[in-house]
């Protein structure tokens, strides 16, 4: 937290700053700005306390009970003890770990590669970055639908393409798949890798944007100095780029790991945990026990017993943020932080060794396949870098530039094909006739183009109502998050009051609390308040995952605004509230827009709460409504493609116009915060 110091001006105009003796006893005890801080933090405190802290406390109480018919009885720790011998729970925990670990590894590799390719490109970088961002923007239900269709063993375009190119039979020869055509989502050996692939496809854009913001923050003179010293491109990457991205990589991986570990909607929409339980994460186990079996105590125990894992990741994140702000600490404190430098340098290697060993134990059938794919990617990148370095050392600048440019374009082409392929399939399927969809004719191009699917969508489904519901809920929750987060973020970044650090840590903790931990007690609370099956149930509960993130990002952004500008406004006679409204908020527009885009997208895409709290068609949002269009094995692919297009277009358009502000907000807020 940064203190606000009055500017130095002639004594005739400004009275000296208040010293300790001029403060009241209450101010000395609670802090100079405690009154204004209480006013600014009150909305945030009420929402977080009522929607996060109270439900967590209630979940702890619920986990000690068991339902017997209509009665709920106290059973102490029995629900936790039963999990020791619960095979379904054990499988869920292992699945969550395997799913998270492999997904994060490939997100880091592909996200870093994409960021480096875009960072060194002078022309078309904004357009390419916008295209790569699309998978992260589109709703999860769109992601799941498109990949389910593409991975269909008989009619899916993936098998057809791999068969036509001869890659499919080659995969069998290399023992990467057991038979051909492959049942990507129905084969127990391939289901988990396929779900991981889809999660990587959706998550790589987030890593790319964060890494791009981090690369922009690395001083160019460091690269110039390394080049003068004769460092190769690989040496510059190892000694300049990676150290410069240390903070960004750690924060991004930690946050993404928390999200991935607690993922429910993607797995549910793709496989519903099958075949068998091979893809069922622990969140799905909790949902099954609490919602399907109505054993709230057992479901709450499943989510709470995993809380130490989340707590460990949060502790790592908080330690990182404190170390990153070490420049503002007293000299003795900075010296204490430097004591553990060697240990911190060794920590990533220790974590890597432990995770590798656990993955080899938990999923040996996936481990070597992932190692082969990752090894091929790294070998190709190393080979291209070696060729470029060799040509440069021999004075062949033009040849090295040609090889480097050609390699970059090939890599970008492959990345764009991977990113945009599923979206292209959605686009063309939406404009096919029902006969073309069923018969699989003209798979890559509609012949003729028709709006038949859009007409059938509005005629056969209450799609317009779902669209309006989603728009209302998203707009309301975004407005609440934006107002409360702006007030709370400013208070935590600028005002001096006792408990500021504790409140900041609480915000961070609530930010990373998974929806899996909250949906059971929130569901019970909504039943008691008779708010289930209403849009109010979503408007009330969505701030649990939008507000903490918005506050955390804005704390970093407000801290990046020069305090001297605010001091000048105070000297000119503005009150603190007037300085906030007239100076700080206009300068924080990029951060506010970034927050609005994030919160609106999260609310637009949210599935778990809407799936649990809403059962009536007239109150469903788009993700839940589209999921309900699938009845057993009957999948209206044409109508779903049309719905996916209509759902995705508004968010994609908003991100296209706000992409510059989004990157700026990330750079000054989440990346530096």
Image (cartoon, rainbow, N blue to C red):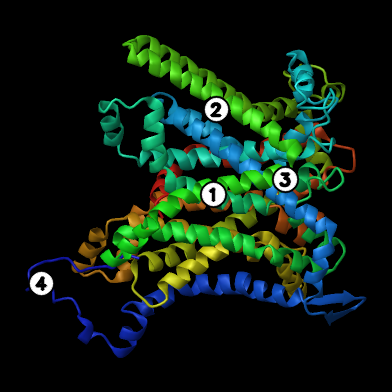
- The N terminus, quarter of image: bottom left
Give the spatial CA distance, label 1 vs label 3: 17 Å
Q: Which residue is mark 1?
A: 350
Viewer-nearest of discs 3 and 4: 3
Please report contact status of discs 3 and 4: CB closer than 8 Å, yes or no.
Answer: no
Q: Earlier in the sequence, mark 1 or mark 3?
A: 1
Q: Which residue is mark 2?
A: 378
Q: Earlier in the sequence, mark 2 or mark 3?
A: 3
Q: Which residue is mark 4?
A: 13
Disc 2 packing (10 Å; few <14; some 14–19; many ≥20)? few
**Which label was assigned to residue 51?**
none
**Which label was assigned to residue 361?**
3
Of residues 388 and 513, the one nearer the viewer is: 388
Q: Secondary structure at mark 1?
A: helix
Give the spatial CA distance, label 2 vs label 3: 24 Å
Give percent across and percent down for residue 643: 73, 38
Q: Earlier in the sequence, mark 3 or mark 4?
A: 4
Q: Earlier in the sequence, mark 2 or mark 4?
A: 4
């Amino acid at each position: 937290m940064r203190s606000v110091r009055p500017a130095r001006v002639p004594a005739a105009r400004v009275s000296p700053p208040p010293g300790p003796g001029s403060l009241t006893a209450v101010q000395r005890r609670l802090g100079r700005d405690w009154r204004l801080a209480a006013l600014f933090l009150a909305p945030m405190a009420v929402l977080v306390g009522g929607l996060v802290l109270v439900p967590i406390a209630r979940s702890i109480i619920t986990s000690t009970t068991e339902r017997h018919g209509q009665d709920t009885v106290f059973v102490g720790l029995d629900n936790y003890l039963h999990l020791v011998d619960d095979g379904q729970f054990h499988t869920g925990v292992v699945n969550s770990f395997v799913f998270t670990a492999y997904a994060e590894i490939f997100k880091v590799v592909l996200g870093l590669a994409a960021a480096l390719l875009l960072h060194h490109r002078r022309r078309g970088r904004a357009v390419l970055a916008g295209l790569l961002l699309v998978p992260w923007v589109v709703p999860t239900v769109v992601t799941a639908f498109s990949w389910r269709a593409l991975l269909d063993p008989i009619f899916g375009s993936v098998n057809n393409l791999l068969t036509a190119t001869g890659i499919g039979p080659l995969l069998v020869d290399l023992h990467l798949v057991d038979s051909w055509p492959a049942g990507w989502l129905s084969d127990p050996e391939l289901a988990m890798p396929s779900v991981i692939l889809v999660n990587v496809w959706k998550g790589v854009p987030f890593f790319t944007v964060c890494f791009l913001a981090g690369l922009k923050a690395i001083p160019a003179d460091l690269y110039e100095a390394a080049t003068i010293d004769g460092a190769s491109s690989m040496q510059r990457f190892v000694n300049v780029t990676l150290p410069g991205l240390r903070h960004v990589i750690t924060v991004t991986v930690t946050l993404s790991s928390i999200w991935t570990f607690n993922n429910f909607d993607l797995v549910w929409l793709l496989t519903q945990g099958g075949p068998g339980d091979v893809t069922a994460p622990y969140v799905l186990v909790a949902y099954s026990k609490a919602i399907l079996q109505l054993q709230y105590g057992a479901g709450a125990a499943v989510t709470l017993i995993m809380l130490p894992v989340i707590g460990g990741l949060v502790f790592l994140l908080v330690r990182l943020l404190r170390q990153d702000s070490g420049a503002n600490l007293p000299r003795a404190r900075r010296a204490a932080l430097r004591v553990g430098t060697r240990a911190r340098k060794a920590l990533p290697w220790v974590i890597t060794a432990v995770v590798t060993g656990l993955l080899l134990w938990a999923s040996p059938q996936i481990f070597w396949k992932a190692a082969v794919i990752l090894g091929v990617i790294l070998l190709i990148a190393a080979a291209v870098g070696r060729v470029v370095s060799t040509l440069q050392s021999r004075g062949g600048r033009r040849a090295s530039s040609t090889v480097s440019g050609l390699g970059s374009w090939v890599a970008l082409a492959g990345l764009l094909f991977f990113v945009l392929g599923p979206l292209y399939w959605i686009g063309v399927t939406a404009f096919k006739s029902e006969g073309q969809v069923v018969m699989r004719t003209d798979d890559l191009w509609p012949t003729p183009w028709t709006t038949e699917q859009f007409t059938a969508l509005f005629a056969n489904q209450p799609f317009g109502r779902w669209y309006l519901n989603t728009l209302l809920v998203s707009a309301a929750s975004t407005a609440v998050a934006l107002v409360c987060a702006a007030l709370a973020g400013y208070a935590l970044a600028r005002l001096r009051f006792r408990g500021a650090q504790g409140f900041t840590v609480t915000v961070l903790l609530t930010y990373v609390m998974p929806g899996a931990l909250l949906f059971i007690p929130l569901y019970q609370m909504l039943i008691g308040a008779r708010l289930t099956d209403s849009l109010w149930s979503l408007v009330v509960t969505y701030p649990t995952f939008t507000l903490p993130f918005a506050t955390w990002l804005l704390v970093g952004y407000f801290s990046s605004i020069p305090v001297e500008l605010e001091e000048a406004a105070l000297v000119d006679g503005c009150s603190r509230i007037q300085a906030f409204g007239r100076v700080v908020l206009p300068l924080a527009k990029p951060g506010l827009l970034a927050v609005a885009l994030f919160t609106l997208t999260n609310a637009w895409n949210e599935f778990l709460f809407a799936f649990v709290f809403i059962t009536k068609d007239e109150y469903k949002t788009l993700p839940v409504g589209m999921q309900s269009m699938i009845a057993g094995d009957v999948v209206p692919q044409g109508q779903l493609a049309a719905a996916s297009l209509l759902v995705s277009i508004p968010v994609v358009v908003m991100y296209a116009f706000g992409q510059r502000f989004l990157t700026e907000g990330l750079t000054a807020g989440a990346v530096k915060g």
